[in-house]
Image (cartoon, rainbow, N blue to C red):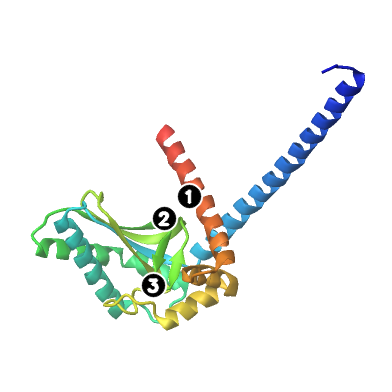
Amino acid sequence: MIINKKNILSVMRKTGSVMHFLSVASRFIFVILIICIIYGGATQKQISNNIIRLHIVANSDSAMDQDLKLKVRDAILKHMQEKYPDGAAREEAAAYLKDSLPLIKEIAAGIIKENGSDIEVNARYGIYSFPTKVYDGLALPAGMYEAVRVELGSAQGQNWWCIMFPPLCVADANSLKMDTNAMNQLKEGLGDNNFRLITDITENNNAPVKIKFRIIEIVEDSKMRIADIINNLF
C-alpha cells in the first residue's frame, strides 16, 4: 500500500467521523443513564412514601428459630388486626406503630418465652433497605422503606416481610391476602401509573411495566451496594 497525502487525509476523515460518532453515542448513553437514575429514584421514593412495612428477622436459619419467627409474626398480626386504627392515614399509622413498639416487643418476647427460649427481642421503627419483594398480586421494588423491624436474638436468620400501611397484611392475618380496601387506599396514594407499576408487574407479557420496574431495581440495588461499600470503608 502506497501511503500518500490523500490516503492520510482519508484515514483522518474516517477516524474523525468515528470519533464524532462515538462522542455523540456516549453523550446519548450518558443522558439516558441520567434519565433512568432520576426516574428510578423518584418513582421508588413515591412508592415508599406511601408504604410502611413490617420486617421480622429470625435469630438464625435453624428450624426452631424460623418457627419462632412465624409464631412471633402471627402474634403481632393478630394484635394489629384487633387494634390497628381503621382508616388511618399514613402519618396516623406511623404514629400508632411508633407508639406500639414497646407492646410489639412485649408480644414478641412473650412468644419467645412461651416457647422456651431466652433470646433477646428488639423492636425499632426506622428506614431500612429492602430487596425486591413479590406478594400476592403486588411487587415492591428494592429500595429504602420505613418499617417496623423486629429483631429476634442475633437477627442473622431469614426475614419475613409484609405491608403495614396500607394494612394489607393486617386486614387478614390468617391468609395474608391483599385486602381490597387497603389496595384501594394504596392506589389512591400512589396514583394510577405507579399503582399499575407495582401490580401489573405480576402479569405475563407486560414488557413496558417490567422494563420500568427493572430500571428502578437496578438503580436502587446500585445505590444500596454503593452505600454498603462506603459503610465498610469507614
Inspect the image, locate mark 3, and give the three-letter code of the amino acid beneath it.
Asp
Q: Position of residue 97 (x, y in %)?
A: 36, 67
Left or right of 38, for residue 52: left
Q: Amino acid at mark 1?
A: Asp
The label shown at residue 221 is 1
Q: Quadrant of residue 158?
A: bottom left
Secondary element at image label 2: loop
Earlier residue among tags 2 and 3: 2
Residue occupied by mark 3:
136
Say which residue label 2 marks.
Answer: 131
> Is 4 left or right of 41, judged from the image as shown?
right
Label 1 to label 3: alpha-carbon separation:
23 Å
Picture quarter with the N terminus: top right
User: What is the quadrant of residue 138 in the picture?
Assistant: bottom left
* Farthest front residue in view: 1
**Which residue lies at the image location 24% right of the left edge and 62% below the top edge?**
105
Q: Secondary structure at mark 3?
A: loop
Q: Is residue 87 visible?
A: no
Q: CA distance from mark 2 to mark 3?
A: 16 Å
Q: CA distance from mark 2 to mark 1?
A: 8 Å
N-terminal-most mark, 1 or 3: 3
Q: Are marks 2 and 1 in contact (CB under 8 Å)?
A: yes
Query: Which sits in the foreground, 118 or 225?
Result: 225
3 up-or-down from 206: above or below:
above
